[in-house]
Image (cartoon, rainbow, N blue to C red):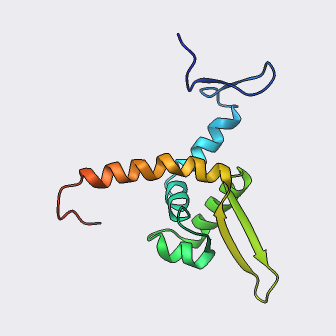
Amino acid sequence: MREGAQLKQAGAGERYEVFHTDCPARGMVDHVTSKWGVWVLISLRSNDLRFHELRDGIRGISEKMLTQTLRALVQDGLLRREVEPTTPPQVTYGLSEFGRDVSVPLTDLLDRITQRLPPGSPG
């Protein structure tokens, strides 16, 4: 069997086994492909946005779910979180270099799906 997505070099002699429940890559994939993770990453492809802009732009997401999703993606290194010391603080989110790399195939996937939808489909 050839080496593919299942096993990938992690470092000197170390390997990630992505089908193992303890694999760190598995948690990150779960965050990226979660119901809201995909939409956050795609929303930030064009420009940085503040919390309320993300909340208003991603229809159907609650503030709680947006907060949890943003925290996970920041922790994974996919997003940058910038806080301006104003009252109240202004928080802006943007893609890190890694987040930009990950969001490219997500955007391509969305483009492929929307191109296949029949004319007049809601959306």
Foreground of the two, 20 or 109:
109
Residue 74, horizontal then vertical, whole percent:
70, 57
Q: Residue at image x 17%, y 60%?
A: 119
Image quadrant occupied by the C terminus: bottom left
Residue 120, horizontal then vertical, whole percent:
17, 65
Quadrant hosting residue 40: bottom right
Which residue is at the far left? 119
Q: Residue at image x 61%, y 68%?
A: 64
Q: Is 50 situated above or below 68?
A: below
Q: Is residue 106 left or right of residue 112?
A: right
Foreground of the two, 96 or 83:
96
Q: Residue at image x 42%, y 49%?
A: 108
Number of numbered callouts drawn: 0
Q: Is residue 20 left or right of residue 2?
A: right
Q: Residue at image x 56%, y 27%?
A: 5
Residue 17, horizontal then vertical, whole percent:
65, 24
Residue 12, horizontal then vertical, whole percent:
81, 22
Q: Is 107 situated above or below 22?
A: below
Q: Is 1 situated above or below 103?
A: above
Which residue is at the far bottom? 87
Quadrant hosting residue 28: top right
Quadrant hosting residue 3: top right
Which residue is at the far top? 1
